[in-house]
Image (spheres, coloured by chain):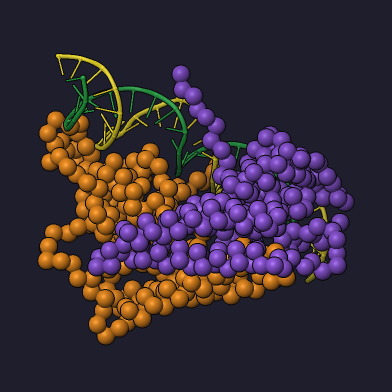
Chain colours: A purple, B orange, C yellow, D green
Amino acid sequence: MTIQTMRRPDPAHALLFLGLLRQQRMHGYQLHEFIDRDLASCTDMKRPTAYLLLDRLARAGWITRRTERSGRRPARQVYRLTPAGETEFQRLLRENLSTHAATRFRDDIGLAFIDALPAREAATLLDARRASIAARLEAARAVAHPDEGQLVMDHLVHHLAAELAWLDRLLARLRAPRPPAPRRPRSTASRPATRPAKERSS
Amino acid sequence: MTIQTMRRPDPAHALLFLGLLRQQRMHGYQLHEFIDRDLASCTDMKRPTAYLLLDRLARAGWITRRTERSGRRPARQVYRLTPAGETEFQRLLRENLSTHAATRFRDDIGLAFIDALPAREAATLLDARRASIAARLEAARAVAHPDEGQLVMDHLVHHLAAELAWLDRLLARLRAPRPPAPRRPRSTASRPATRPAKERSS
DNA sequence: GTCTGAATAGTCATAACTGACTATACGGGT
DNA sequence: ACCCGTATAGTCAGTTATGACTATTCAGAC
């Protein structure tokens, strides 16, 4: 008998969704528009995939769905984070920050949510990340023989070095006497990290 | 009636396979081992996916399959590039070099095969690539508001800038009076770009 | 000789992803 | 009033990807 362990949804995408819904409740279309508009460089997720992921997150109990209707527009499913979802978000975030997968840009999405953790802890997690990047850099340098036409390896080495430099600057900031303290203008309401998809009708 | 246009296999993966088989005939397991060992930072393709892609490339007529047997080991399917495959390789390479997709590292795989084109043409294609990176950089800078906790955007901007710098160095080399000319030591036999998966028994 | 572990070379049932499609609402032109 | 283009909000059939599995060969231990 075959035991098919359920394949986990891409942790980076799950983290992204939980992180966005944590900042603001959204409906599916809105969520996908935001990703497609502002995060196109990180991921190219298609709309059906977004709805699929929302279903999975809802089934796992990390988000709840509520039908809403504004005016006479068709009803929307509005999603918001549950306490269990907050826990899972924190878990995924810690996991994401402490490793560096390096095959896709979206794997770095945890960096968008680093404010969710105390600066001290974030710095500790990023130390692990730093070590994993440094190890990769060593490995890539070891394989790269400059006398062959190994542009990919050269390219990879360059990228990893840039990544390491960026991370070191971030770590320095996190550990500075006065932490970055992203001063949000006087509004106290929580807002998404970047401009939310515009919502004209209310 | 629904017209399902056949989804093309990931062009980056197709380019990678054609490029490797162009340099050396290989059997499926060997090909996947090579990718998994030396290119793990570029792609995390699984073995069944590799076999699937080989089937697709063979059906498209870009590679041929031949059963071989060495000693009393089980028979292997050995793949090699066809003339049509060479054409497709060139097409994919040109396409790959002239754009920058930027959501996955494997999208840069064309850089590994840049020697397959005349330096002059490669430089022209990379000019287009440069423009697309520069445009992305502009867009990312426009979205990034430094007063919000927009680490992803900052991170992305940094990466794109590093990419641009690397590309400019490459372009300078390609256009230098004495082209890079990767001097291969006196062996005339064609060899893969990096060490081939070891083949002990013959 | 035969057991054990590692390498080789795949296959298949099932899960994941997406191109194309459906359908309602709204603003503006005529 | 009616048409057209755009935005909203999804669904689904068909394709793609993969975790778990099967099976043979070989080297070395005993």
In screen coordinates, is B44 left or right of B181? Answer: right
Question: In this picture, is B149 found above or below D9?
Answer: below
Asked if residue A166 can be seen in this view, the reply is yes
* A100 or A30: nearer the viewer: A100
In which quadrant of the rendered view does residue B143 lie?
bottom right
How far across and how far down the image is residue B122, in percent?
33, 73
How far across and how far down the image is residue A128, in percent?
53, 53
Residue at screen point 84% across, 58% down: A189
Question: In this picture, is C4 found above or below B181?
Answer: above
Question: In this picture, is A131 found above or below B74?
Answer: below
Residue at screen point 70% across, 55% down: A118
In screen coordinates, is B189 left or right of A130? Answer: left
Question: In this picture, is C9 found above or below B53?
Answer: above
* A133 or A119: nearer the viewer: A119
How far across and how far down the image is residue A162, in percent?
48, 68
* A41 or A123: nearer the viewer: A123
- Looking at the rendering, in which quadrant would you find the C terminus of chain A? bottom right
